[in-house]
Image (cartoon, rainbow, N blue to C red):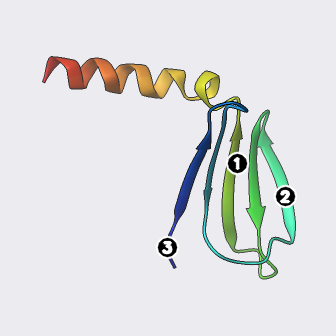
Amino acid sequence: MSLKVSYDAEADVLYLAKEGQEEEVVEVYPGVNLEFGPERELLGIEILGASRILKGVVDPLREKAARS
């Protein structure tokens, strides 16, 4: 199954998902939701306020890439 990644810049939402019927959504951290299928398989990850939540990850990667 392929993983689809999409980002809505206006809403600042990052979504990673694979095909399947969503049965349950669990908020694991404020603004981070996991979506599960009928067999409790992970189908998706939704990150609300993605630029804020991922800033600590993305900024160091950008700096490292600029030095390379």
Which of the pair 52/9 is nearer the observer? Answer: 9
**Distance Cα–Cα, label 2 vs label 3:** 20 Å
N-terminal of the two: label 2 or label 3? 3
Residue assigned mark 1:
46
Residue at the farthest front position = 10
Query: The residue tagged with tag 3: helix, strand or loop?
Result: loop
Q: Which amino acid lies under the numbered mark 1 shown in the image of this protein?
A: Glu
Q: Is 26 left, or right, of 53 in this rendering?
A: right
Residue 38 vs 3, above or below: the answer is below
Residue displayed at 16% across by 17% down: 67
* Label 3 sits on residue: 2
Residue on which the image places disc 2: 25
Which class describes the residues within 10 Å of circle 3: few (<14), some (14-19), or many (20+)? Answer: few
SS assignment at label 1? strand
User: For residue 56, which numbered disc appears in the image?
Assistant: none
From the viewer's perspective, tell me whether residue 26 is left or right of residue 20.
Answer: right
Of badges 1 and 2, nearer the viewer stands 1
- Mark found first going from the N terminus, 1 or 2: 2
Mark 2 vs 3: CB contact within 8 A: no
> Badges 1 and 2: C-beta atoms under 8 Å apart?
yes
**63 versus 50 height, above or below:** above
Q: Residues within 10 Å of mark 2 (few under 14, many from 20)?
A: some
Q: Residue at x 52, y 79 (%)?
A: 1
Q: Secondary structure at mark 2?
A: strand
From the top left corner, tell me how far across and down residue 63 is, in percent.
29, 17
On the picture, is 45 further left or further right than 39? left
Q: Pick whichever of labels 1 and 3 is earlier in the sequence.
A: 3
